Image: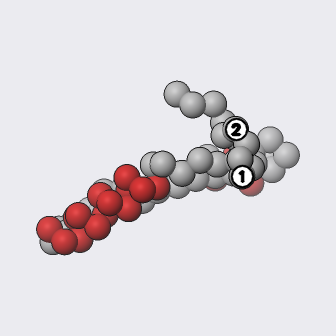
Amino acid sequence: VMQLAGSDPEQVKAVVAIAGHPFGYRMSDDELGAFIEALNKRSQFVFGEPGGPPSFPTW
């Protein structure tokens, strides 16, 4: 995806990434709770102009 974004910036308007599993690291219960809360909060973000429709179709 990053190569595509760099090679054709006229077609690719944004690249969104999220770090996946923290390999080798065990979160405490508090850290895990904060991570899940942040993940759920981010899942509600709508990308596009304020008051307008999303910049991509909903699934």
Q: Nearer the viewer, residue 28 or 53?
A: 53
Residue type of the residue flagged with mark 1? Pro
Q: Would residue 22 be found to the left or right of residue 11 on screen?
A: left
Q: Secondary structure at mark 2?
A: loop
Residue that extends furthest to the top in the rendered view of this protein? 59
Tell me which residue sits at (54%, 51%) in the image. 45
**Coordinates of residue 56 in the picture (x, y in percent):** 66, 36
Residue, disc 1 = 50
- Confirm whether residue 30 shows in the render: yes
Q: Quadrant of residue 31?
A: bottom left
Tell me which residue sits at (63%, 30%) in the image. 57
Q: Nearer the viewer, residue 33 or 1?
A: 33
Residue, disc 2 = 53
Q: Residues within 10 Å of mark 1 (few under 14, many from 20)?
A: few
**Coordinates of residue 37 in the picture (x, y in percent):** 32, 60
**Coordinates of residue 16 in the picture (x, y in percent):** 58, 53
Residue type of the residue flagged with mark 2? Pro
Tell me which residue sits at (19%, 71%) in the image. 30
Q: Residues within 10 Å of mark 2 (few under 14, many from 20)?
A: few
Q: Would residue 49 be found to the left or right of residue 15 on screen?
A: right
**Coordinates of residue 55 in the picture (x, y in percent):** 70, 41
| Res. 38 mark | none
User: Please, is residue 31 above or below residue 54 in the view?
Assistant: below
- Confirm whether residue 3 shows in the render: no
